[in-house]
Amino acid sequence: MSAVEPRLVLATRNEGKLRELRELLRGRIAGLDVDTQVIDAAAAGAPDVPETGVTFEANSLLKARAVAEATGLPAIADDSGLAVDVLGGAPGIFSARWAGAHGDDAANLELLLAQLADIGPEHRGAAFICAAALAVPGAGETVERGELRGTLLASPRGAGGFGYDPVLQPLGEERSCAELTNAEKNAISHRGQAFRALLPSIVRVLEGRPLPEK
């Protein structure tokens, strides 16, 4: 196989997610050049896939399957969001569009904090949740889950990260996710957990071995 022929596609156009996956795989598989052979959806010419599932797992599998079918390559996809205990797990899969418009972080934060304005700190438990799926054309699929638990702050803190990072303070931390460095956040993140749990399956597939039966 040519050194520049793609072997794995990540169903996203988010450069940060691609960089994180490449670093997880770097040096783990003989002959794999992660910088050229692990690519994103844009480089693969893969379509955007509507997130029509009702769970993080369902959405990640939908995207992984569609991109694997479109490209003929093993595909990884993830879906993630914030689950607030007193809201019964909401915003959940609607996290990115909680205030109505998709991706309006400021509006989403404002609405969430208004909904929790009268809730004391002892009842502000929440978690970032991520499901990451791997789909292999004609050879099966698997999905893993990661979770970063914490407490929701009364107001945003920190300029880093995105989404709800400024209002989630991880358990055992005195800073919000937006106040952590990228390395600190990646070490504990829900997405990092899910990708690391998926890693043995990714390695098996790229080494030409079948996925384990579940």
Image: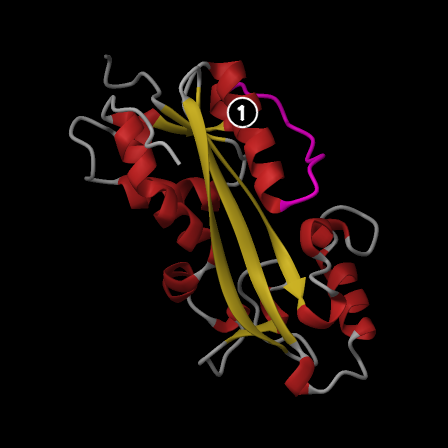
Which residue shows up at 33% across the image and 29% down it? Answer: 211
Residue 49 lies in the magenta-colored region: yes
Which residues lie in the magenta part?
45-55
> Which residue type carries mark 1?
Arg
Which residue shows up at 41% across the image and 63% down it? Answer: 188
Please indicate, yes or no, whether residue 157 appears anywhere in the rendered image. Answer: yes
Q: Name the residue under label 1.
A: 65
Does residue 184 sit above or below 105 in this rendering? below
Residue 121 lies in the magenta-colored region: no
- Where residue 2 sits, quadrant-wise, is top left
Closer-to-camera residue (109/160) = 109
Q: Position of residue 16 (x, y in %)?
A: 46, 46
Which residue shows up at 75% across the image and 67% down it? Answer: 87
- The quarter of the picture where the N terminus appears is top left
Closer-to-camera residue (17/197) = 197
Which residue shows up at 32% across the image and 16% down it? Answer: 5
Q: Where is residue 125 in the image (x, y as percent from the top left)?
A: 62, 75
- For disc 1, the neighbor class at 10 Å (few under 14, some 14 to 19, many from 20) is many
